[in-house]
Image (tube, rainbow, N blue to C red):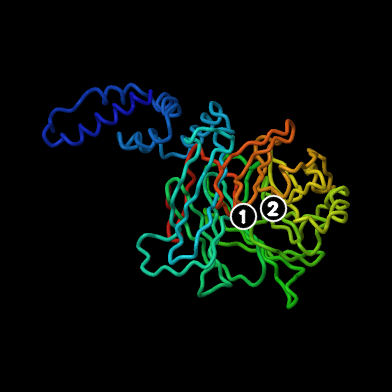
Amino acid sequence: MNKFFLRLLQNQNKRHKKKHKRHKKKTSNFSFLDDLLCDELLEQILCRLELKTVHRCKSVCKRWLSLVSSAEFIDQYVRFQQSVSPTSSRFYLAFELQRQASRHSSYRLDIGKAEASSSSSSSKSFDFDTYPKHTTRRPWVYYSDLIGSWNGLVLCQETFEEFLQKPRYSVCNPITRDWLVLPPYEFKGSHQAGFIDDDDGLITTTRGFKVALVEVDQNKSGVGNYLNISVFSSCTGEWRSQRVLCREPVFFAGVRGLFSCNRMLYWGNVKNPNFIIGYDTSKMPPPDECTYIDLPPEYKERERSFHAVNDGLFIGVSQGRILICETLLEQSQPLCIWELQDCTTSSWRLKHKLVVDSVLNRRIIVAFHPIDGDIVYLAKWKDGIHSLNMKNKKKQIVENTKAWRCAVPFFLPWWQARLQDQNNSKQT
């Protein structure tokens, strides 16, 4: 069917090129086909095509352009593709590679297939630039971070040499190389940022995106009892902030510690590692207090026993649930993964427990598999990234790059998400 529509598009292109010579002679093949296909039948046919072919069909005629561009067709296309294509086939790990500070902010993002494979075609590489091409003066990028991803988009943070306290956030589509610089935000304290998931962490929507920024309104000692929780919506192009009270002082170390699931935000607290904090972004009006989730008693005991070697708490999302474990694996203690059952009662379930051998020693957790709850991803400097099945203890190499800086789960969407610039909405 793809070949048929490609031939049709080629014939249409030839017809447009020769329309001045054959003004009185109109080809009847396409007119007959267009008249024969009602909208419902045409939608069913287009839903079965590859996304690239569907976009090319926009050039056939105005009717097809209008149909393919409609929100109803996009939703129908996504639902059909979800029903015939397993979600796991869309899952990758996105790696940001080590790079030197430079006068530009271009990225090279390596996206390796999350399932281990010996085929070299299982990895893809994308170059994209978070500055528009017409920018004449590009500031020196002092530091950059890949914060997270959602629905085929990645969130990047960049700090510049001339204003170190004012980092810039950008949302980029590495597939289309489209970008959106978020409006400036006046930072006053330590903060963390990330996308807001509208569902269970998988791709079920195509309309817009939201970025959350949680900032500590800190005092002179660097901590604070108030948080400024700001949400940027691509639909409005603006930040909306809410001042939230915390019952205990909060401090953030690093910017890559904010996780989202079902519109809830979760993060840890360096000042008190006995609980994680949650905030519901879906409630209206926005709540003025956070939810405190006590960590499992077993985890607290392990923290006291192994505090000398422990390297902090790792939070992630898998199968629509929040998972936690210790970031650093030590041969002297088992790897334990807990799953959050109920945030209101701080109910946890021990999901996995695995003895750490010499092969796994000193590796760090970089990601949970969002679909397969038995798989975690481990990394070690200059030793690449491996997948580990907690049930059968099978470990496989996923990415052998020795220069990775971070790795985040990445989904190739069934339909490209839309970005909006700061002046007018722009569809990718």
Which amino acid, by three-letter code, is at mark 2?
Leu
Relative placement, left or right, of 338 versus 234 is right
Q: Mark 2 points at which residue?
A: 265
Q: Mark 1 points at which residue?
A: 194
Q: Quadrant of the N terminus?
A: top left
Whether the residues at callouts 1 and 2 have beta carbons within 8 Å, the answer is: yes
Which amino acid, by three-letter code, is at mark 1?
Gly
Residue lying at 63% horizontally and 41% vertically, measured from the top left:
386
Closer-to-camera residue (282/85): 85
Q: Quadrant of residue 155?
A: bottom right
Mark 2 residue element: strand
Residue 232 vertical position relative to residue 88 in the rendered view, above or below: below
Q: Residues within 10 Å of mark 1 (few under 14, many from 20)?
A: many
Give me the disc on residue 361. none
Cα–Cα gap, marks 1 and 2: 9 Å
Count of picture labels: 2
- Across and down, in percent, residue 246 comes to 78, 64
